[in-house]
């Protein structure tokens, strides 16, 4: 009995200590401009909201509760701007960072971070990694090869101004909306109930969907396509030239184009509509 009582007391003490080390925002929102060095990559976590703006220089403005400002870290390590907090914040009334840059090649967002763009972004090859329920929205992105890795229920919406190639891996219930796609090649892998809505035009595309993933790509003109759906995944496509199709596990496929079927493997529980 004494051991049980000691265990309860120790757990309560640990909880009280952890609670005493958390900080709550005081509601007085302030802005602070900070100077930073050059960077071409951003890494953010801890639930910060980022607003990205391409300009002629590099700079950041932090908006948060007055008593939380000292715990906000914005530092350049190598070529990466890192944005995070070094304290346990229980509640804040605002967590926003306005980021201005000349060139940006990659974004990593985790831990419930939100990333939005203010205006066009033009760059070379571009890489995005979102995890842990992070959300990202870019209004007009012009880039070379686009690579996206999305997991943990992340929501992503990107409107492309131009692109050359598209590579996407989405898993863990992530939702992706890619508009204005263009280029010679696209490779998209969806799993774990992830959904994709795609529009634009691609010469060639290879797409794999599994674990109840859904694809809405009727507004994406595809020349040649290799498509594999399994595990009750559904897809609507617009393939114009050639189609290689594999369906398993109760998956459904609909195509409004009139492609040549170069290969088709479909199980009895699947449905094909051409």
Image (tube, rainbow, N blue to C red):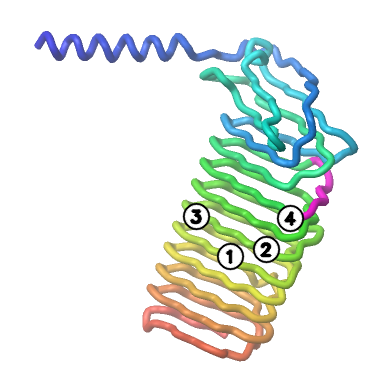
Residue at image location 59% in from the left, 73% down from the top: 206
Point out the stretch of residues depicted in magenta: 118-125
Residue at image location 49% in from the left, 14% down from the top: 22
Front disc: 1 or 4:
4
Q: Secondary structure at mark 1?
A: strand
Residue 119 horizontal side relative to residue 125, left or right: right
| Dot 4 alpha-carbon crowd within 10 angstroms: few under 14, some 14 to 19, many 20 or more | some
Please say if the residues under marks 1 and 4 sit with CB atoms less than 8 Å apart: no
Q: Quadrant of the N terminus?
A: top left
Residue holding disc 4: 125
| Dot 2 alpha-carbon crowd within 10 angstroms: few under 14, some 14 to 19, many 20 or more | many
Badge 3 or badge 2: first in the primary sequence: 2
| Dot 1 alpha-carbon crowd within 10 angstroms: few under 14, some 14 to 19, many 20 or more | some
| Dot 3 alpha-carbon crowd within 10 angstroms: few under 14, some 14 to 19, many 20 or more | many
Please say if the residues under marks 3 and 1 sit with CB atoms less than 8 Å apart: no
Residue holding disc 3: 171
Residue at image location 54% in from the left, 71% down from the top: 235
Separation of residues labelled 3 and 1 (CA atoms): 11 Å
Camera-side residue: 221 or 263? 263
Q: Does residue 119 belong to the magenta stretch?
A: yes
Residue holding disc 1: 188
How far from the left and from the top, in percent, is residue 169? 55, 58
- Quadrant of the rendered structure where residue 204 is? bottom right
Residue holding disc 2: 166
Q: Secondary structure at mark 2?
A: strand
């Amino acid at each position: 009995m004494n051991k049980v009582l000691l265990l309860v007391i120790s757990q309560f003490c640990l909880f009280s200590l952890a609670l005493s080390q958390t900080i709550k925002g005081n509601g007085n929102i302030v802005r602070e401009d900070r100077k930073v060095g050059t960077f071409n990559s951003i890494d953010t976590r801890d639930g910060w909201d980022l607003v990205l703006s391409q300009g002629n220089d590099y700079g950041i403005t932090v908006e948060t509760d007055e008593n939380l400002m000292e715990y906000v870290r914005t530092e350049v390590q190598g070529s990466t701007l890192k944005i995070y907090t070094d304290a346990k914040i229980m509640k804040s009334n605002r967590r926003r960072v306005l980021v201005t840059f000349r060139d940006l090649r990659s974004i990593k967002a985790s831990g419930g971070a939100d990333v939005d763009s203010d205006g066009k972004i033009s760059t070379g090859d571009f890489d995005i990694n979102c995890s842990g329920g992070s959300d990202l929205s870019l209004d007009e992105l012009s880039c070379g090869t686009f690579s996206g890795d999305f997991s943990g229920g992340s929501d992503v919406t990107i409107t492309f101004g131009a692109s050359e190639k598209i590579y996407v891996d989405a898993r863990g219930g992530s939702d992706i909306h890619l508009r204005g796609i263009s280029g010679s090649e696209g490779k998209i892998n969806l799993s774990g109930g992830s959904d994709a809505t795609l529009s634009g035009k691609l010469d060639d595309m290879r797409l794999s969907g599994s674990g109840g993933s859904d694809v809405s790509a009727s507004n994406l003109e595809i020349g040649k396509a290799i498509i594999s759906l399994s595990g009750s995944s559904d897809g609507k496509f617009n393939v114009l030239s050639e189609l290689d199709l594999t369906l398993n596990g109760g998956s459904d496929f609909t195509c409004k184009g009139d492609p040549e079927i170069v290969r088709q493997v479909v199980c009895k529980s699947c449905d094909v509509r051409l």
